[in-house]
Amino acid sequence: MKALEGVKTLLVYLFLMWCLVPVLWLVSTSLKSDVDAFSAEPVWFFTPQWENYATAWTSGGMSQAMATSTIVAVLSSLIGLFAGIPLAYLITQVWPDTGNGARRVAMTILLFTTVPPVLALTPLFRTFDDLGLTRTLVGITLIHAYYATLLAVLILRAFLVNFPREIREAAMVDGAGEWRVMVRCVMPNMTGAIFATFVLSLIQSWNEYLYALVMTGGDTQTAPVRISGFLSFVGTNWSTLTAAGVIGTLPIVAFGLLARNYLARGLSFGGVK
């Protein structure tokens, strides 16, 4: 048994090393000079070049990209919640479980999540271009909000399926309408699930690259797109590129660490059983 436990511990440490080595390489390269970063031999000892971060933040345009990503991620996540909560409530509480309508809606939403984004890229671009929404925050926010809505329905439906219908029926007997039941009776009992959905939608929007690459440009570029802009055919400044990568990754990692306890609690105990 001890030998088995030792093997498990070793495998865990190997997995952690596998996950952390790219992060350590990213951070260390961001602090090297251009000569050390391009060196064919590994440079283990060097003087940290903190000006790489200043260059990426100012000259590299990461300040504008970070602000854009924050606005798009927060707005799209909130829109996804405002649209997803009523839809999840509708297919779990208003429609009976035995009805085909709720099953069809849930299955349709699930199928939408399996469609590769690249398939919808061309029609969405042509539509948004005709509407004048390309290269704007409105266009990319609407696209991210669509996926945030799908995610919200899938997560919140799992909690609302187990929500006692007797609470809804008792509230409606007292004269409350569907909106009041949802806001006053249902939502207070699933704040953890709502917060967890918001965090996951935020991360999903922050990391999205394909639509942001095609739909944005100039001052509307998000952080992942701006980071990719440091790559060029002429030459790549790896020090500035990795510094931009650290800047773009740090806020969402920090937010995830701060919210990890609430996220785990929300995904585990979000509904009334």
Image (tube, rainbow, N blue to C red):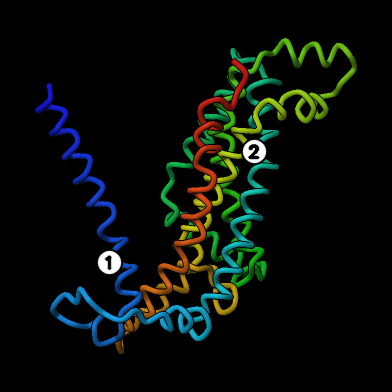
Dot 1 or dot 2, earlier in sequence: 1
Q: Is residue 176 above or below residue 208?
A: above
Image spot of residue 253 (x, y percent): 46, 55
| Residue that badge 1 annotates | 25
Q: Residues within 10 Å of mark 2 (few under 14, many from 20)?
A: many
Q: Residue at x 90, y 17 (%)?
A: 175
Q: Nearer the viewer, residue 215 or 38?
A: 38
Q: Residue at x 55, y 60 (%)?
A: 124
Image spot of residue 235 (x, y percent): 30, 87
Label of residue 84 in the image = 2
Image spot of residue 213 (x, y percent): 47, 68
Q: Residue at x 61, y 60 (%)?
A: 72
Q: Residue at x 30, y 81 (%)?
A: 47
Image spot of residue 89 (x, y percent): 67, 27
What's under tag 1, amino acid-wise? Trp
Q: Residues within 10 Å of mark 1 (few under 14, many from 20)?
A: few
User: Which callout, 1 or 2, points to the residue nearer the camera?
Assistant: 1
What's under tag 2, amino acid-wise? Gly
Q: Is residue 70 above or below residue 160?
A: below
